[in-house]
Image (tube, rainbow, N blue to C red):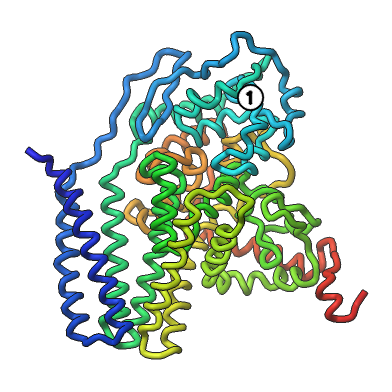
Amino acid sequence: MIPLRFLSQKLELTITWILLSCLFSVVFARSSNRPADTERQLLNWSVPMAASLLAARFLSSKYKPKKQVENTDKTMTFKHDRGETKLVPLVPKSNKKKLKKYTMAEVAKKCTPDDLWIIIQGRVYDITNYVDKHPGGKLVLNSMGGKDCTDVFANYHQARVYQTMLPAYCIGEIGNPSEVYPHVKDFRQIEQDLLQQGLFETDQQYYRNMYLWLASIFIASLYCSLYLSSTASHMFGAVLMGFFWQQFAGIGHDIGHSSVSHNFYTDHFNGSLYGCLFMGISTGWWKRTHNLHHVVCNSIENDPDVQHMPVLAVSPKFIEKPFWSTYHKRLMQMDSITAFFVRNQHILFFPLMAVARFNLYIQSWIMIFNKDFKMYNRGVEAAGLTFFIVWVLSLALCMNSWFESVAWVLLSHAVAGILHIQIVISHWAMETYSGSAYNNADDEWYKMQLATTMNVDCYEWMDFLHIGLQFQIEHHLFPMLPRHNLRKARKMVKQVCEKHGIPYHEKSFYEAVKCTYDLLCVTAAKARAGDYLKVPNLIADGMNAQG
């Protein structure tokens, strides 16, 4: 007997492709002025298809995580690998019979791209020759040079990396390793508990339901924008499209962290294809910036997610003195142009969020043409980004007038701007720092993530609206934990924070927005008062015949 779940998956794939074909036929029908009866017939076909897709979802089995037996061997540890929990040696084997002893101070000196060492579980690794090959980008490794990367590495790599890649780079071990901090032991135990309970496994049923949800929003947007004729209906279609982009971003975020299939290449390809096709945003660009953001969260010099000058300064620390951005490779400073924007950023903030998506399009194309950075699926992404422009413009041009077309584009992007607000409130109001982190008990991996990240408190039934971004603390601590299990991890993390007196930041959505906005206002006030180091802007001064 053929499993019912297998039939439902096959049926779903068939229906999905038929449905998309019908929908795109409607777009072409509108754009080529085909008779309205043809459009109505095609759309009438899409209704039963959508109903069939919905019925297929109810045929799938429920998710049951595979729990593991308790680990009593201190030389072994749980690791996840391709979505499955495995019991593996705590310290990977070395290719060398005898390991040389090093001190922490000796390793700390090896922190340049030309001579870069790291420490993992007391072992010393010389990864100088691997820096340019790193899938997450070399900036991530440069930021961790000369440091103990045990927890950072554990939360971003699967078991096979420990077994197949690390041994080749092992050159020694720490002679007198420092004792693990008590709170770090507890946080590591949380990870072991999550793994033992099978919570690093992905519930594929959850994502199939999400795909149905996204398809429903997309269909509804096309229906309102193409089939209905009134301006109000078209604008509602634009609202739905913006909501579709906001919701799709949650899937893109999960794929970017390889927490859907747990296969780097599979998730990366799906992100490159569908992310570019339906979102118009490069997965390669997103992963480059986002990987770095996680490792150096809220670092003034290193985190691209808080470096928005000359338009915005996240906190007063950004305008105190010029600083060099290691990501953008340029000096960020308060010249006359930057000062103008920062003085008024409290006024510009929400309008900028409404059009911020256009900047992501630009950054995506810059990445496509940036040959200096190793990029997976460059051709696929270029084709997807091109097709995105084609279908969005074709859809917008189906409106009743040029004015309505422009309004459709702006409104859809303004609604999608909710996503940008959701992203920034988790970090902008939190601690920012200059220099290097991960030096001692006060700024080690777990405490830094907790100090620079905020959760959004919401009811469980609203989790879909926040697309996982409401659990940013748990996500930053355990980046590859599937979204649908973050709420369970939240309980464990709060208990450890309470036990060790570590602040756990969680506010309502309104309060988080207010905290972010208030800090922007404080920074703007300092800029208006001239409380910053002034530097000349050669272009502006030249245009005004100054200097």
Residue 461: quadrant of the picture: bottom left
- Residue 176, percent across and down? 68, 14
Picture residue at 71% right of the left edge, 49% below the top: 326
Residue 441 visible from this viewpoint? no
Picture residue at 64% right of the left edge, 51% below the top: 372
- Residue 276, percent across and down? 44, 60
Q: Is residue 165 left or right of residue 103?
A: left
In the rendered image, the quadrant that contains the N terminus is top left
Residue 307 visible from this viewpoint? yes
Q: Is residue 274 above or below residue 125?
A: below
In the image, what residue type sits under mark 1?
A: Tyr
Picture residue at 73% right of the left edge, 35% below the top: 114
Task: Tell which of 44 and 507 is nearer to you.
Answer: 44
Q: Residue tagged by mark 1? A: 125
Q: Is residue 140 left or right of residue 455?
A: right
Find numbered disc 1 in the image and state the secondary structure of the residue it sits on.
strand
- Residue 513, percent across and down? 54, 62
Label 1 environment density (alpha carbons within 10 Å; few <14, some 14–19, many ≥20)? many
Q: Is residue 502 left or right of residue 36?
A: right
Q: How many marks?
A: 1
